[in-house]
Image (tube, rainbow, N blue to C red):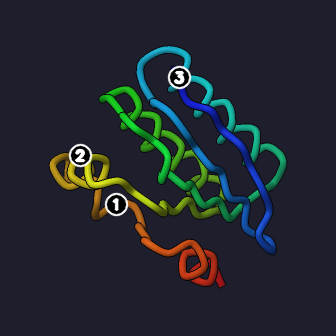
Amino acid sequence: MSVKLTSRQVGDVTVIDAAGRITLGEGASAFRDAIRGFVAKGDKKILLNLADVTYIDSSGIGELVSGFTTVTNSGGQLKLVGLSKRVKDLLQITKLYTVFEVYDDEAEAVRSFH
């Protein structure tokens, strides 16, 4: 199963709930298209909820970085919430844990945008 993305608004923050696998091919491109779509719409505050992501490979990590860059270059912020131990470990190994703002609690993450 590839990634399934759903979005919702919490105040002026767009929360993207990801579930499944962010891997080479369909999962990574769906993720990329979603981020670009939100940025094109003018969304500047994007919170990516990875609580239901079961697996992420190197191209998925690449898409996270690409999404972060796209949002940042448009003057917005992309933050992460709800990382599983596996995803958190992967971000620490790749030294990307210091690049992203990571939160355990969604309410705290939403507040951090203000």
Position of 48 relative to 54 (above/below): below
Q: Are marks 1 and 2 in contact (CB under 8 Å)?
A: no
User: Mark 1 to mark 3: distance in Å?
Assistant: 25 Å
Tag on residue 90?
2
Tell me if mark 3 has few (under 14), some (14-19) or many (20+) residues whose alpha carbon lies within 10 angstroms of its own: some
Binning the other alpha carbons within 10 Å of mark 1 as few (below 14), some (14 to 19) or many (20 upward) gives few
Where is residue 48 shown, x and y percent of the image? 56, 54
Of label 1 and label 3, which has the lower sequence position?
3
Residue that numbered label 1 is attached to = 99
Q: Amino acid at mark 3?
A: Ser
Horizontally, is 46 left or right of 82 in the view? right
Q: Which residue is mark 3?
A: 2
Q: In the image, is residue 78 above or below residue 69?
A: below
Depth check, mark 1 against mark 3: the one in front is 3
- What residue is shown at x 37% (from left), y 26% (from top)? 59
Which is in the foreground here, disc 3 or disc 2?
3
The answer to which of 67 and 75 lies nearer the viewer is: 67
Instruction: Give the residue type that dot 2 points to.
Output: Leu
Amino acid type shown at disc 1: Val
Q: Position of residue 94 (x, y in %)?
A: 20, 46
Spot occupied by residue 106 in the image (x, y as percentages of width and height): 57, 72
SS of the residue at dot 1? Answer: loop
| Residue 70 higher or lower than 84, as above or below | above
Q: Could you give the CA–CA distance between mark 1 and mark 2, rounded to whole angstroms? A: 13 Å
Q: Earlier in the sequence, mark 3 or mark 2?
A: 3
The number of numbered discs placed on residues in the rendered structure image is: 3
Q: Residue at 71% across / 61% down in the picture?
A: 44
Q: Residue at x 74, y 49 (%)?
A: 7
Q: Secondary structure at mark 2?
A: helix
Residue under the point 58% across and 53% down: 73
Instruction: Using a 10 Å C-alpha cutoff, classify the residue at mark 2 as few (fewer than 14 neighbours), some (14 to 19) or many (20 or more).
Output: some
Mark 1 or mark 2, earlier in chain: 2
